[in-house]
């Protein structure tokens, strides 16, 4: 393998890990509540702006903003689920809550354009010497934000998987996702589980935003690209499978970065969607999905 | 969910349609070109939402990729016109035919998917098509798109400098789509589709050939949407992959229908009447502050759906039912029946 390709592969894995982290929260919400949340990309954009404000105004190291963005987004997620989405969700008995889809479309437009009105359309990136530092290993070059993205995305995914698997709350979340009625019978308060899942999903997204900012400049519409891609990642990995979302992210990252070495870059974007359609056709439960709906 | 309806008179529901046409003729009186162009777009979206309604509403298959069919219609007729001199009046049927073929392909690969999976697969299809068109530099102009050859006042070539021309056509399109929706809602075909929407497994168990009916609904919906694409190309006289294949467009078409009330006859029209002028009013109110108009638009979407997730049509039906209740206290015809 030539070093260009190896470089592309490893860079793809690094950015793919961050894509996976972005998709993690979506997968959790999707798996537990079966809702399509189109505002996910907008929340990512929000996280990136929070991180930017902390780094630029308070002079924090970009990585150190992550706990704060996570907290802010966790609170936002809790509030949005508790006071906005819950009431719509309850009004609908159907298995596929279309109302939430439309609501989140409205929220997506609202958030994107609020930020446009507040901060203007320009790209902003974080100004820190750290984000341009590189690590050279033979022919290969990595930036520190890439390495940090890979390391922290993997750690957080592992932590979330462990949380869902081994803690009482985590098991309650999974139980609600599998069968809401049965979980209720067993004394699980589904409203609380939904608030928690939504908040955790956005909290993880907050970290992803802080990790993404040194890699990618932020503007009010940055979420549109990453939001749609997050859906692809979630379905590739298998809806509701948190670890699957992570691997799905890595596949998309590698495909994008290696693909653009082999075929014209304008086609690389389509490659992701073609793979998506192929997986949908041959394995609708996703590459790593276990439960079939 | 749906009861078996009593036999309705043949002309039932045509009264509101006549009223709609009369009211819709009003913008023509003033002749204000600005108001007319908003009215044209409103009718176009009403038409698109009605086309979407057949698959997304009546049959309950949440397609978010209708931009694909819209784009196929726009590009087919424009390519035939620019390169071969075919009138778009003919080209639009070629576009519709092509969109129906595309619908067959999409259906074969996506129809076994349900709900959210189906929705995402349809978006992905539209994105693949968009990328292909963006890369077809020589044939379709790539990301820059195509311009429709200007002929100025050439009604035979689907072009005119007056907005009234487009308005009358858009109105005719919308009325045709309303009649098609009405015919479906009253037919056996429509009941099969409703059965698929309400409980696919039960419908299958009762011997409804699900796959065939879903395919028919998808083809009809796609063909009608493609005609709308041709209309758009001729109205704006310029098309680009972003404008006619964008993921946003596919979502907006669905949103208009759902906000109004999916699966109902008048819901898609109500949705368009609220959202399109709503966008313009928001623009006026915000006084040109960047972004504020769309903020208000997003807020409007959230408020409507928070108020009634089934859409505005359900709100009107609720009012009517309550009034009828207060009137005679007798049994009220359920909302789902009235629209037929």
Image (cartoon, rainbow, N blue to C red):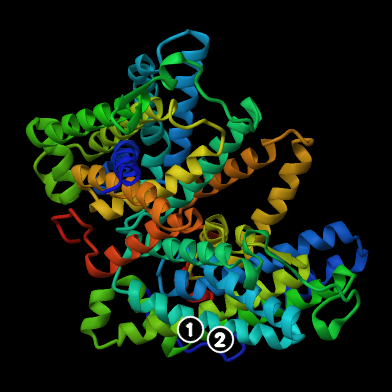
Give the left or right position of residue A291, taking residue B140 as reference: left
The secondary element bearing badge 2 is classed as helix
Q: Residue at x 58, y 66 (%)?
A: B268
Q: Image quadrant of residue A205?
A: top left
Residue A284 % position (x, y): 24, 64
Quadrant of res B260 = bottom right
* Figure check: A251 above or below A189: below
Label 1, on which residue?
B101
Q: Are marks 2 and 1 in contact (CB under 8 Å)?
A: yes
Quarter holding the C terminus of chain A?
bottom left
**Label 1 marks which chain's residue?**
B
Question: Do we see residue A64 in this rendering?
Answer: yes
Residue indicated by mark 2: B97
**On the same chain: label 2 and label 1?**
yes
Q: Residue at x 77, y 63 (%)?
A: B39
Q: Is residue B246 left or right of residue A245?
A: right
């Amino acid at each position: 393998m030539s070093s260009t390709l190896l470089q592309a592969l490893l860079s793809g894995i690094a950015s793919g890990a961050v894509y996976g982290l972005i998709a993690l929260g979506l997968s959790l919400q999707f798996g537990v509540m079966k809702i399509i949340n189109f505002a996910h990309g907008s929340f990512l954009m929000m996280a990136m702006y929070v991180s930017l404000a902390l780094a630029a105004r308070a002079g924090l190291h970009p990585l150190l903003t992550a706990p704060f963005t996570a907290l802010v987004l966790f609170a936002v997620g809790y509030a949005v689920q508790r006071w906005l989405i819950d009431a719509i969700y309850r009004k609908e008995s159907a298995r596929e809550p279309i109302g939430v889809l439309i609501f989140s479309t409205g929220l997506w437009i609202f958030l994107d354009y609020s930020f446009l009105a507040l901060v203007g359309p320009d790209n902003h990136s974080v100004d820190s010497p750290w984000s341009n530092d590189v690590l050279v290993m033979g022919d290969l070059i990595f930036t520190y934000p890439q390495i940090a993205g890979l390391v922290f995305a993997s750690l957080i995914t592992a932590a979330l998987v462990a949380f869902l698997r081994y803690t009482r709350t985590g098991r309650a979340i999974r139980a609600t996702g599998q069968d809401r009625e049965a979980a209720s019978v067993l004394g699980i308060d589904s409203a609380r589980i939904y608030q928690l899942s939504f908040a955790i999903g956005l909290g993880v997204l907050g970290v992803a935003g802080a990790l993404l900012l040194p890699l990618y400049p932020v503007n009010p519409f940055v979420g549109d690209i990453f939001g749609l891609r997050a859906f692809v990642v979630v379905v590739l990995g298998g809806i509701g499978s948190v670890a699957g979302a992570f691997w799905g992210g890595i596949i998309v990252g590698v495909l994008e970065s290696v693909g653009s070495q082999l075929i014209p870059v304008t086609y690389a974007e389509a490659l992701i969607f073609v793979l998506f359609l192929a997986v949908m056709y041959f394995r609708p439960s996703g590459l790593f999905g276990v439960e079939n709906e | 969910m749906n009861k078996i309806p009593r036999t309705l008179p043949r002309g039932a529901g045509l009264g509101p349609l006549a009223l709609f046409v009369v009211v819709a003729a009003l913008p023509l009186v003033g002749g204000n070109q600005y108001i007319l162009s908003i009215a044209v777009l409103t009718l176009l979206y009403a038409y698109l939402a009605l086309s979407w309604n057949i698959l997304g509403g009546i049959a309950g298959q949440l397609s978010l990729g209708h931009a694909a069919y819209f784009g196929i219609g726009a590009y087919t007729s424009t390519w035939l016109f620019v390169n071969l001199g075919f009138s778009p009046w003919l080209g639009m049927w070629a576009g519709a035919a092509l969109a129906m073929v595309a619908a067959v392909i999409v259906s074969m690969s996506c129809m076994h998917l349900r709900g959210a999976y189906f929705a995402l697969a349809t978006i992905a299809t539209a994105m693949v098509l968009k990328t292909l068109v963006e890369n077809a530099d020589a044939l379709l102009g790539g990301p820059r798109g195509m311009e429709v050859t200007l002929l100025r006042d050439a009604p035979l070539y689907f072009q005119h400098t007056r907005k009234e021309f487009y308005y009358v056509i858009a109105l005719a399109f919308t009325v045709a789509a309303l009649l098609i929706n009405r015919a479906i809602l009253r037919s056996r075909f429509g009941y099969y589709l409703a059965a698929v929407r309400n409980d696919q497994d039960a419908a299958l168990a009762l011997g409804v050939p699900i796959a065939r009916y879903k395919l028919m609904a998808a083809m009809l919906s796609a063909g009608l949407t493609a005609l709308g694409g041709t209309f758009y190309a001729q109205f704006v006289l310029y098309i680009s992959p972003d404008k006619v294949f964008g993921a946003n467009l596919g979502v907006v078409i669905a949103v208009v229908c759902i906000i109004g009330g999916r699966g109902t006859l008048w819901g898609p029209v109500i949705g368009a009447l609220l959202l399109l002028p709503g966008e313009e009013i928001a623009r006026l109110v915000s006084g040109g502050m960047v972004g504020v108009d769309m903020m208000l638009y997003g807020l409007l979407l959230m408020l409507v759906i928070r108020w009634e997730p089934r859409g505005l049509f359900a709100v009107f039906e609720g009012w009517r039912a309550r009034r009828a209740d207060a009137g005679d206290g007798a049994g009220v015809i359920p909302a789902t029946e009235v629209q037929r």
